[in-house]
Every structure is written in structure tokens, then in C-alpha cells.
Amino acid sequence: MLSLFKTPSSRLICHVSRNFKPFLISTRKASAISDRVIFPKQKLIKEQTEYKQLPDDSMYIEKFYDELDQFKKEIETNKSITQSNFSDFEKDPNELIQQLELFIEGKIKPQYVEKVMSKFQMERFDEFLRNVKITLILNGGHPMIFDILLQSKAQFDWFVKRKK
């Protein structure tokens, strides 16, 4: 049986009713983590424009440093992702969005499915995805801002730690 629906973050999801046989992920045995298939939406960033600085009061990504850092580590370590940082997605920011959607659906949500705080964590990552999209729309489609934000936060944290 096949059914289609849209999630709150407007991704088209296909539910497939069938049983999956266990498969291997690295050296650990696991069963299928989800019966969902993600169909990428139309390109969100149709044309990259000149970089536009975000307003000072825009807090789209600042409250998601942990999620941004977690996704950056995924980019660096996942061999199926050819880019190694956010700036490498400069030619196709839609690829960044697609990789983030795959990361959330394939790695994040399965971690929280049976935990008490699961709904909160999954909603937080969905909000993170929405805010990444908003940031890319507002700044002209330039993902290098995420590298800059993480570098700035690391420097600020180092400065605060050193000051103590």
C-alpha cells in the first residue's frame, strides 16, 4: 500500500507498507529505520543572488548552534556527501537543504522515536530545517554563512573561557 502526505515542513513523504529485512550499517546489525521515502521538493533557491546580510535582530540560526554543529560533523564524516563544509554547497544550496532533510529523516528522527523527549527533539530539528531555508532565502542562497556563524561562536566561546 502506498500513501502520500505532506509533513509540517512541507516535504512530500511516501509511506510504503511492507516489511524490511535487517541490513548492516557498518558492523552493527540493524533493521530499517523508517518506511518513509523523501521526494525532494522543487528547488527552493531558484537563482542565487548577491549576498545579503541578515538583519541584526534575525535569530533564525543563532538558537540552533548545536544542531548546526551536529549537521556540520555529519557533512565532514559522511562519505556519501561530497562536500566537506557549508561553503562547498555554494554552487547548489538546494543540495544542502536536501542533505539536511535526509540527515533529519535518516539519522536524527530514528534516534528519538522511542525516547520521552522525542517529539520535542524532532520538532526542534524541523524548526532548524525551516530556519536554514529562511536564512538561505533571505541572504540570497549563500550557505557559507553557516561556516562563519560556527567559527564566530567557537571564537567567542574560546574568548569567554579564556577570560574566566
Image (cartoon, rainbow, N blue to C red):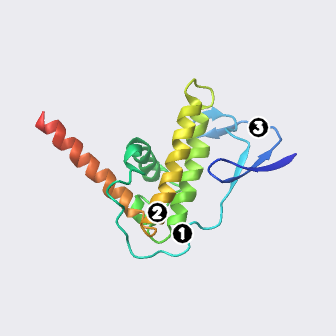
Identify whether 134 is placed above or below 90: above
Identify whether 123 is placed above or below 9: above
Give the position of the C terminus as an image quadrant: top left
| Of the pair 108 and 58, the residue shown nearer to us | 58
Instruction: Give the amino acid at mark 2.
Output: Leu
Identify whether 164 is placed above or below 133: above
Identify whether 108 is placed above or below 47: above
First in sequence: mark 2 or mark 1? 1
Secondary element at tag 1: loop
Give residue 47's position: percent from left, percent from top.
52, 76
Side of 3 where 140 appears, left or right: left
Q: Nearer the viewer, mark 3 or mark 1?
A: 1
Question: In this figure, which residue is indicated by the disc labeled 1?
Answer: 45
Secondary element at tag 3: loop
Instruction: Give the amino acid at mark 3.
Output: Lys
| Of the pair 100 and 81, the residue shown nearer to us | 100
Q: Seen from this angle, which residue lies furthest right?
A: 1
First in sequence: mark 3 or mark 2? 3
Give residue 113's position: percent from left, percent from top.
62, 31
Q: Name the residue at 22% across, 48% down.
A: 155
Give the position of the N terminus as an image quadrant: top right
Question: In this figure, which residue is indicated by the disc labeled 3?
Answer: 21
Q: Name the residue at 23% across, 42% down.
A: 157
Secondary element at tag 2: helix
Instruction: Give the amino acid at mark 1.
Output: Ile
Q: CA distance from mark 2 to mark 1?
A: 8 Å
Q: Nearer the viewer, mark 3 or mark 2?
A: 2
The label on residue 82 is none
User: CB atoms at circles 2 and 1 under 8 Å apart?
Assistant: yes
The label on residue 136 is 2
